[in-house]
Image (cartoon, rainbow, N blue to C red):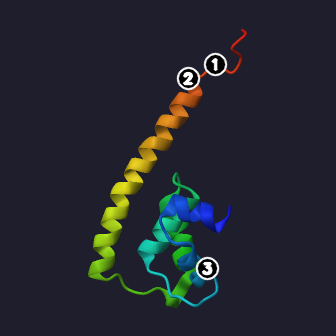
């Protein structure tokens, strides 16, 4: 998966992802949660724990601004998840062989 795809799915910018990967930025747990959600929306909690363990002491505390921003992201994520779910239902409802 490319940085652009992860950015689109998680809401975390490519520059932030790249800086975290290169050790130029210390992540917040919430950012790791959004990355986990973008990577695998079905298994967010275990993946977030794995990312937090990998980050170790480099994790930093959440700020009030960060909490408000992530609350807005959560609203968008819920909408995105609903759209994905609707697409899956639509895909399941389509007949794979229209000639049958």
To which quarter of the image does residue 77 belong?
Answer: bottom left
Secondary structure beneath dot 2 equals helix
> How far apart are the alpha carbons under marks 3 and 2?
39 Å
Q: Which residue is mark 2?
A: 93
The 10 Å Cα crowd at callout 1, few under 14, some 14 to 19, many 20 or more, is: few
Q: Residue at x 61, y 60 (%)?
A: 5
The x, y position of residue 45, in whole percent, is 47, 62
The x, y position of residue 82, in whole percent, is 42, 43
> How far apart are the alpha carbons under marks 2 and 1?
6 Å
To which quarter of the image does residue 30 belong?
Answer: bottom left
Is any atom of residue 37 visible in this view? no
Callout 3 touching callout 2 (CB < 8 Å) = no
Q: How many numbered marks does the figure carry?
A: 3
Q: Which residue is mark 3?
A: 18
Is any atom of residue 97 visible in this view? yes
The answer to whether residue 50 is above or below residue 83 is below
Residue mark closest to the camera, 3 vs 2:
3
Along the line of sight, the residue nearer the viewer: 69 or 30? 69
Q: Residue at x 69, y 14 (%)?
A: 98
The x, y position of residue 75, in whole percent, is 33, 56
The answer to whether residue 30 is above or below residue 59 is above
Decide which of tag 3 and tag 2 comes sooner along the chain: 3
Spot the residue most to the top: 100
Q: Which residue is mark 1?
A: 95
Secondary structure beneath dot 1 equals loop
Q: Residue at x 31, y 65 (%)?
A: 71
The answer to whether residue 92 is above or below residue 29 is above
Secondary structure beneath dot 3 equals helix
The 10 Å Cα crowd at callout 2, few under 14, some 14 to 19, many 20 or more, is: few
The x, y position of residue 79, in whole percent, is 39, 48
Decide which of tag 3 and tag 1 comes sooner along the chain: 3
């Amino acid at each position: 998966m490319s940085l652009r795809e992860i950015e689109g799915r998680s809401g975390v910018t490519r520059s932030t992802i790249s800086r975290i990967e290169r050790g130029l930025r210390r992540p917040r747990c919430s950012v790791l949660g959004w990355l986990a959600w973008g990577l695998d929306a079905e298994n967010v909690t275990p993946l977030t724990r794995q990312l937090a363990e990998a980050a170790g002491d480099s994790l930093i505390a959440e700020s009030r601004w960060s909490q408000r921003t992530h609350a807005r992201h959560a609203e968008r994520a819920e909408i995105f998840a609903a759209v994905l779910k609707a697409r899956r239902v639509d895909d399941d409802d389509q007949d794979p062989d229209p000639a049958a």
